[in-house]
Image (tube, rainbow, N blue to C red):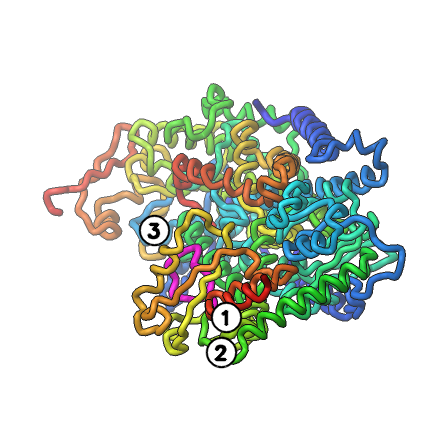
Amino acid sequence: MIRPHRYIITCLALVLFALAGCRHDSAALPAQPAKPPALRTVVSLVPSVTETLFALGVGDRVVGRSRYCLYPPAALALPVVGDALNVDLERLLVLKPDLIVFHTRVQSADRLTAAGIRPLAPHIETVDDVYAVIDLLGRELGVEPAAKTLTARLTAELAAVREAASGTDPVATLITFPDTIGGGAEIRAVGRGTFLDQMLTLAGGRNVVSTDSYHAASIETVVTWQPEVIIISAPGDIDPGQSDEHYRAAWSRWQSIPAVKSGHVYVLRQPYLTMPGPRMGEAARLLLATLHPDRAAKLENAAK
Amino acid sequence: MTAPAAPNALEVRDLGFTYGQGRFALSGVNFSVAPGEFVGLLGPNGSGKSTLVKLAMRLLPPAAGEIFIDGRRAGDYRLRDYARRVAYLPQENRPAFAFTVLETVLMGRSPHQGAMGFESAADLARARAALDRVDAAAFADLFLDELSGGERQRVMLARALAQEARLLILDEPASFLDLRHQYELYRLLRDLARAERRSCLCVGHDLNVAAAFCDRLVLLCAGRVVAAGPPAEVLTAAKVREVYEIDADVTLRPDGRPVVLPRIEQL
Amino acid sequence: MSFTVRRYFLILAAAAVLWLAVAGFSLVVGAENIWQLRDSQPDAFNQILSSRLERTLTAALVGAALAASGVAFQALLRNPLAEPYILGVSGGASLGVILATVLLPVSCLTFTIPALGLTLSAAGLAGFLMALVTVGAVYLIAQRHGRLDPYRLILTGVIVNAFFGAAIMLTAALAGDRLRNEIIYWLMGGLGSLRARWGELAVAALVILAGLAVFVYQAAGFNLLSFGEDVAASLGLHVERRRRSAFVVASLLAGVSVSLAGPIGFVGLIVPHLLRMIFGSDHRLLVPLSIFGGAIFLMIGDRLVQLVPYNLVGGLPVGVVTALCGVPFFILLMRRSRTPQGAAP
């Protein structure tokens, strides 16, 4: 007859056994790419990586994308092989790319590696990450010159924005997101060290959030921050039917916030704003145009 | 342990039980059921009848005294062996799922079957015979839910018969039955005792139906046996007064069995 | 309609054949046309087949385990609405799996015995232990004076589920963005994996098959328990012992399935009830039939989910489908079922 205490003892023994057996081989993905031969085809499940691949001129070697990879338009023709959480394993095994770029942490994907598909899950959050990914993809796909050119172009674009914004008073700015589910008193705020924070600083803004990363803040805290400008980043695909006015209305009762009082609440729908990728120059210029329209106009004229 | 020379089907000696708090649910209870005897166990609410049944079914351990089954201490039997000797019929027994009558009766065979509970042709024959005995063969393929209360109790009795236990312990089997079905059930039990020498201990509330069919009655009050013996000796006006605290006229039927008629004008 | 050994084996043989057919069908049918690949891309053919085989076996094991533990819980608690998901057992196991995943370093989550090809999973163990704790807790909370009221039991399950849901959400909130998404997705209950999990599957298979064997062996006792513990004891069943061991095994089955596939709900409710409607309540038949039926149900469910094109709704987890089917079913059953009279624990 089965007795519970015996079960428990067995289970404890198994737990100890399992813990004792911990090995410290990192199951993470190999960080250093193998040297040659260069990889031919890629599936990208990360929108910014898909853009980067096209910007590097290897769009024709991309054989699959995620449901959220919507740019450039040429990418739309590619088959959908997954999204942020999921991969269509069978499709992938048929497409048989040399490389797949994931969004999420992948503990182990030996079904892919066994099929000769190298998984890659780069962390892309900052401007430096963007350059690193460009560099990495350039090497992996054997297009180093294109990578160098792209990096140089982006560096120049960002420098131009920084130049254009120099000498202005940094505008105290809050970047947030629309409350898509509705009604909560929590504000999701963009914190320091993030891509948007970097773009904001370049464009002559000062992030009112002093903590790192993204986090939720109560509306009461936001009031104490006293932002002069509030930017609501609402990429077009999130909630296409919703009007800007609707997003702004959520803030209208907080007249004690300078940004609200002076009407400086902006809804920015451009998807590239939140995308650390080859369109980050555009993102920086968009923020410049929002915070310092005069400087943005000057920059545009200079470019012409 | 000295067993009686001619072992009783059930023998209760100095039985005591307490649910704690020092209050005895039963104390010093003595009585027996001889082979082939139909004994009715009567008593008011809270007199300890159900506790006694639970003790006899080994669902509770006695605090004092002993229970003997066929001359052997009840606790010394293996559970399966006990089930082959003692069958139990509760007040009402509806399963959580829809079983057919035949399936239900076949479960009575389980103390005789292997662990997996597969029935042999002999098991099936016994179950059908038991159904025949209680005149329920026609229901075999019906679901228990489709039967009336009286029919269902007959099926449960058939399960106890299929169990082939010599002793049946019934806990208020007629509570939910109408007058006619009550009498029919008791008559069936009496016939079983007479014809097949099965022993029955039947707990009940209805004094008259017990008096009409039982060989002997045991009257329990506040955990003690107040009277035991043939119905006419147990159900006297004095005893009824003592146990139920109600005045009653006791008359005798032509066959000498008593009928208790409470005087309601006193209530 | 009597229960005879021949009928028993005939029905089970038919179930086994159906099981095999569905399993074979699961290997062949999918979003990719496997026959075409056989000639054009033999590598991909083999890899897809291997992945489908693993997925099919996982579905079969998880489905069987869930359905069998559903039958067992229903018999033990004398409640046709009992099921690991509803009782909160799956929720408890989920919390165990998630806590193990979040708290333990990646390298400690699994331990492989190369010689045997087996992989012990810390998450699986945590799932089982939490399932056991949950069953104990639900049982203790729901009983009153030694009796289990069926509706009190369901209510306790609701409360326990709410508690574990909150604990899981708290864990997810503290776990960071990426892990949070994974947790939420995992909670929907799905079967596929980019990782070949044969080692884990082998361990789970051993545990599950052993548990199922115990239930097949105990099935006659479940019949007796349906009539209440007093009657079951009077028919020679060691009620306490049987109930304890069956609770442990049912928790084991639920815990292991959760660790394999996340909390997939309502399989343990739908499958046994459909089978009861067709074949009756005799557990000697119902237990093994539910094992086959649960396996078939989940295999078919997972295949259907797999057939949905990815650019529509990619990789829908099968748990979403079973829950969508299960909830109306539960309501129907609850409205139709009578309270079992004198439902003893």
Q: CA distance from mark 3 to mark 2?
A: 102 Å
Q: Is residue B116 magenta?
A: no
* Res. B220 mark: 3
Q: Callout 1, which amino acid?
A: Arg
Nearest the viewer among A187 and A112 is A187
Instruction: Report in which chain the residue with disc 1 lies.
Output: A
Q: Callout 3, which amino acid?
A: Leu
Name the secondary structure under disc 3: strand
Res. B27 in view = yes
Q: Position of residue A162 (x, y in %)?
A: 58, 74
As drawn, C94 above or below A209: above
Quarter of the view holding residue C133: bottom right
As drawn, C291 above or below A256: above
Quarter of the view holding residue A160: bottom right
The residue positioned 69% from the left and 56% from the top of the image is A52
The residue positioned 42% from the left and 63% from the top of the image is A266
Q: Which residues are magenta?
A: A175-187
The residue tagged 1 is A295
